[in-house]
Structure formats: structure tokens, C-alpha cells
Image: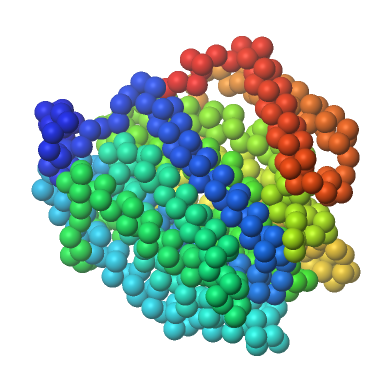
Amino acid sequence: MPATKAAAHGGGAPPAPGEGPKPRRGGGLLRSTAVFSAMTLLSRIAGFLRDALQSRVFGVSVAMDAFVIAYRIPNYLRRIFAEGSVQMAFVPVFNELRERGDPKALKEFLDAMAGALLAVVLVFAAVGMLAAPLLARMFAPGAIDDPDKLALIAGMLRITFPYLVCISLMALVASVLNSFGRFALPAVTPVLHNLVMIAAIVWASRWFAEPVKALAWGVLVAGVLQLALLWPALGRLGMRPSFKPGFHHPDVRRVARLMVPTLFSSSVAQLNLLVGTIFASLLVTGSQTWLYLSDRLVEFPLGLFGVAIGTVILPHLSRRHAAEDSEGYGATLDWALRMALLAGVPAAVGLLLLAEPLTAVVYQGGRFTPHDTRMAALSLAAMSIGIPAFMLTKVLAPAFYARQDTKTPMRAAIITVIANVVMTIAFTTPLWLWNVPGAHGGIALATGLAGIVNAWLLWRYLKRAGLARLQPGWGVFWLRMTAACVAMAATVLALDAWIGDWTAIGSLLLRAGLLLAVVAAGALAYGVAMVALGLRPRHLQH
């Protein structure tokens, strides 16, 4: 077996292809999740700095709305080809081949897969660049009568679409590294992305007639540098691919069959945001920017915990399925569900209660006014109700993908997107027609509720398939978490009422200090309550 061979290599020459060490068992999932989350935390801190600078330098404007649209479209495709379909369809097949212990066959598959992926994303990037004016009209129908805005969107799309090539290859590299239990380096690469974007805001923007265009170039440069950072790690595993398009390779064709349903299901949250972006183009200027900035704050707990847990358990679940270990599969899924809720529920409560303080600290200043703070906080509060569901989806979807079942999550995704469109129309249209301020909040609320629909459907399908085998202790778990969240909410509300209007606090340093104190007090109340009610470190192990 590969793991046995790998032990013989010690600290010397790199192992032969496919012979890297398998992740450790026991508490390995918690350790791997902690490593991934720690690296992600660095990225999120850099991301907060980037967003703070971006909002203060560019504010809320037509140009900023144009960038949001130009970034959302290739970013949605990135979720399809990168974090979505490539990871969810490729990892189970890759791990299955690893279990067979044939390094040559594994390397041939990787070569064929890398070549096929590169060919496909090059075509998509080229078509996207050529069709940029049409895409601008499709995704910004509210700007049809504004040719300057459409031209700006199309111009930035031509810059951001090549990013798809780099980031898709980076996702393939990261999937291979994750399969070998190497989570730290792939998790830290977004830090580089944020640092490049900060450089674009602070330095490069002064060289452009339209400063916002520097952000589009920053996206492209960041993609190139991220791929360059990860690429050498494959060589150390003996897994650096040769790009030999293998569309007829049987395992590549198997990945392709698995990918088709995941093109939709693995990126349902991003697709819902894209739907929201289209509707927001019909609302007042700034609506797209407010929604984008709200989503950036929602992505903090989701990336820190939800994505980390989902990324770590996918290779583990796929190996358990390949080994026909149904008991280990069920125990891993149960652990992941508890971890997702343990982080997701208090995160949702915290963001809901502290939406305005968070927005004021991260974004307010410069061209970003107190009014912008209140508008962004409105959509953040509405969207935050879906955070536990977003996290559960990151756990539930891999439970299907690990078994190479990609059709079931696709069915859930189709229903979810339809529900999102219906709710967006129902919530937003009356507010828009009556010219009520904050109509974009209806879009955010629909996005959050759609996330709940998606998680519920996945759970229902999982139970129907007999895969949801919960371990004992869930009743106690729910009681502990509910009581701890009540303690946290009471602490946060009391401190928030004492502080008053956050937008009126002129000093950023004072705002940030008060927010850190409130967050720390809330987290302490949650943690102390959980421990007092019987939670112990052993309960977090797997």
C-alpha cells in the first residue's frame, strides 16, 4: 500500500508518485481542521484589511458596483471549476486510485486530468473575454441605459477572466495536496491574493484613469502568484503533472461525468449571490457593493470553519467509502455536523447582533459613509441567518461526493436556486416599487433562506439514502449549544446597548477596541457556558 511505502522514505528523497503519507487517524481530523482554519484566519485578517482599504478608498459608486459585477462572474466560474466541481469530483476518484496502490496509473490520471482541465478553462476564459459586452448586459440589466458603466464592466471582465485559468489549476494542485494530508499551504494561499489586492488599492490604483480598474488587474496577478506558490509542492510529492489532455482517459471521463451535476450543486451559494447581483443592478447605486461587502463578512466564519471542515472530511470520507467502512464514514459525518453547528450557530447569532458594529469598524471611513454602514449592516443581518445552513451544506454535500453521487446534490441545488429566485422577487419587488430604502435587504434575506432550504434538502436526501447515522448525545449537544448561545446573546446585547450608536464613534481605534471587547466577552460567555454544561476536549476529537 502507498502509506507503507512512504514510511520507507523517511526524510530523504521525495517519494515516488502516489506514495506520500496518508493523513493520521485518531484526532487527525481535528488537527487538520485546526491547521486549515489557522491558515484561513491569516487570510481573513488580510481580507479584512483589504476590504477596509477598498471601502474607504473607493466608497460606494458606479465604478465600484461595476467591479463587483466583473468580479462576481469569473468568481462564480472559479467556484465551479476550482473549489467546486474539480475538488468534489476529482478527489474521490484520485483517492480511489491511491487506495489501489498503483503510482504509475495515478500519475497518468493526474497528467490526463491536468491537461483536460487546462484545455477546458482556456476555452471558457477566451469565450468570456470575447463575450464580455454581452455578459455585462446579462448580469447588469439595470445598466442597459448607462453605456459607460457597461463598458467599464466589459473592460474589467476581459482582465479578470484569465484569472479563471490560474485559479482552476491551483484548485487541482490543492486537491492533490489535500489528498496527501497537506492542508496548510493551500489554505494560506488566499493571504497572497489579499496582499496583492491591497497593493493594487494602495499603490497601483494611482496609475489608472479609473482607479477601480487596478482591482481587476490585482485579481489576475494574484491568481498567477498563487499558482506559482503551490506548484513546487507537487514536485516534493513526485506528483507534478505533465499537461497531456486525456479526454478519453477512463478516469478523466469518470470525473467529467461526476463534474456535470456538481457544476451546479457545488456552487449554489455563489449562484444565489449571482442572482442577487442581477436583481441588485435594478436598485439604487450601491446596492451591489453593500451586498458584496455583507457577503465578505459572512464568508469569514464560513471560510474559517465551514470550508475547513468540508475540505478536511472529503478525502477522509472518500477513503472510508473506498474501504467500505460504513461505521467510520458515519462517525466522520456525525463529527463534522457537530463541528459545523458548534461554530455556525454562534457565528450567526453574533453577526446578526453585531451587524452594524462590524460594518462600522471594517468599512466606515473615507468615502464609506454612516449611511453606507447602515445599508451594508442591513443586508449582513439578513444574510447571517443562513450561516449555520451554509456550513452544514459544506459538510452534507461532501457526504454525497465522497460516494461519487453528484446527482443528488444537483437536485437539491436546482430546487434551492428556484426558491431563491422566487423569494428574491417576493421580498424585493414590493420594496423596489414603493421606493423603500434598503430593498437590497430582501435579496440578502432570500439568499440566507435559500441556504436553509439547500441544507434541509441535502439532509433529507441523506436520511432517505440511509447515510445519516447520528451518534448518541445529540439531545445534550443541542441543549448545551442553545443555552450557550443565549448566554452569549445576553452579554452582547447588554454591551451593545451600553455603547449606543456605533456610527457616531469618530475614532476608528476606539470603535475597533470596543468591538474586540464585545466579541471577546460574547465568545467567553459562550465558551464558559459550554464548559459549565459539560463540554470537554474529548467531545471535539475524532
Left or right, 293 with reference to 200: right
**Front one among 327 and 91:** 91
Q: Position of residue 375 (x, y in %)?
A: 79, 57
Left or right, 237 with reference to 52: left
Quadrant location of the N terminus in the rendered image: top left
Q: Position of residue 483 (x, y in %)?
A: 72, 21
- Looking at the picture, the colour scheme in use is rainbow
In this rendering, is residue 326 above or below 201?
A: above
Q: Residue at x 47, y 75 (%)?
A: 159
Q: Residue at x 57, y 70 (%)?
A: 205
Is residue 295 among what the camera can see? no
Q: How many marks?
A: 0
Is residue 434 among what the camera can see? yes
**Front one among 421 and 285:** 285
Q: Position of residue 69 (x, y in %)?
A: 60, 70
Q: Position of residue 279 (x, y in %)?
A: 69, 69
Q: Residue at x 63, y 60 (%)?
A: 54
Q: Quadrant of residue 16?
A: top left
Q: Residue at x 54, y 48 (%)?
A: 46
Quadrant location of the C terminus in the rendered image: top left
Left or right, 334 with reference to 364: left
Q: Quadrant of residue 419?
A: bottom right
